[in-house]
Amino acid sequence: MKKLSMSLLALGMTFVLAACNEESVTDETASEEVRTIQVTTPPTSKNLSWQTPDGEILGYEPDVLRAIDEKLEGYEFNIQAVADSAQETGLKTGKYELNVGGFYPTPERKEQYYVPEEPNGRSLIKMYVREDSDIETLEDLVGKNITPFTAGGGTLQVVLDWQEENPEHKLDLEESSGDIPYAQRLKEIDSGKYDAFVGPANLGQNEVIEELGLKVRGTDPIYVGETILLIHKSEENEQLVEEVNQALKELREDGTLSEISEEYYGEDIFQYEVTK
């Protein structure tokens, strides 16, 4: 009986050790199946994306990234706030594998990177005018005093393209030698120095207007563009771009992207049709 008991004990220990080893292997395999993706986002573009003094990364695009990450079981996003120039260099070299930054789709970007077919957001360009102004469209800016545009900026190009298509409506356009803070631009509208400021609607204008008590309002968008994710082009990322695209599609269809935009922009940016 003693020999039998010892044999049963040894057999039991064998099963326990085998189970432990199997659990260890299973855990290790599961860990290997989760791939960490180095993701970058702008550090100072409130409300699009910004980093607080204590290191927290907030904004529309970071929350979209987190929503995508929740849907992708085989990946874990390591989101970092990185300056624009470093983002671009890192994505080209593969140091970073996914970038966001309010990017417009261009043939060059689609050639250089993987770009999901599904956009991650909308870029709205609006006019900011005094509350009592009757300016609603670009045609209404004829003969008006418009704040200078950032030289070479995307907003200026949108207005120039419109001007080319509508030569009968001649606008007086000026360029600035450097970036002018949005708060200053909006205060100049409130004071009456300028009649209108034309610019992206995703950089915290509503908060500035409210905080400073300005009698300024935004018009309906004069331009609506799509914004995209950029993914480092490699064989390893071919599956990633497909899964990110599917996740974005689901998040748009179930209203998650609209909810995030309402939180950060105060409106559903997906209610607007993209400008053709």
Image (spheres, rainbow, N blue to C red):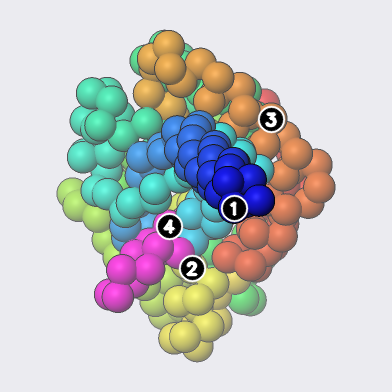
Residue 70 at least partly seen: no
Q: Relative to 170, does residue 137 appear above or below in the rendering?
A: below
Three-letter residue code for mark 2: Gln
Q: Are marks 3 and 2 in contact (CB under 8 Å)?
A: no
Magenta span includes 56: yes
Callout 1 touching callout 2 (CB < 8 Å): no
Q: Does the residue at mark 4 contact the one at mark 3 (Cβ under 8 Å)?
A: no
Q: Residue at x 39, y 48 (%)?
A: 78
Q: Which label number is shown at residue 2?
A: 1
In the image, what residue type sits under mark 1? Lys
Label ID, residue 251: none
Q: Which residues are magenta?
A: 46-58
- Identify the mark nearer the N-term, 4 or 3: 4
Q: Main secondary structure of the magenta part?
A: loop
Q: CA distance from mark 2 to mark 4?
A: 14 Å
Q: Could you tell me if the residues under marks 1 and 4 are in contact, i.e. CB atoms within 8 Å?
A: no
**Secondary structure found at label 3:** helix
Q: Position of residue 103 (x, y in %)?
A: 45, 36
Give the labeled residue for mark 3.
246
- For the residues labelled 3 and 2, the Cα–Cα distance comes to 32 Å
Please, what secondary structure does the residue beneath circle 4 have?
strand
Residue at the extreme front: 1
Q: In front: mark 1 or mark 2? A: 1
* Residue under numbered circle 4: 49
**Which amino acid is tagged 3?**
Gln
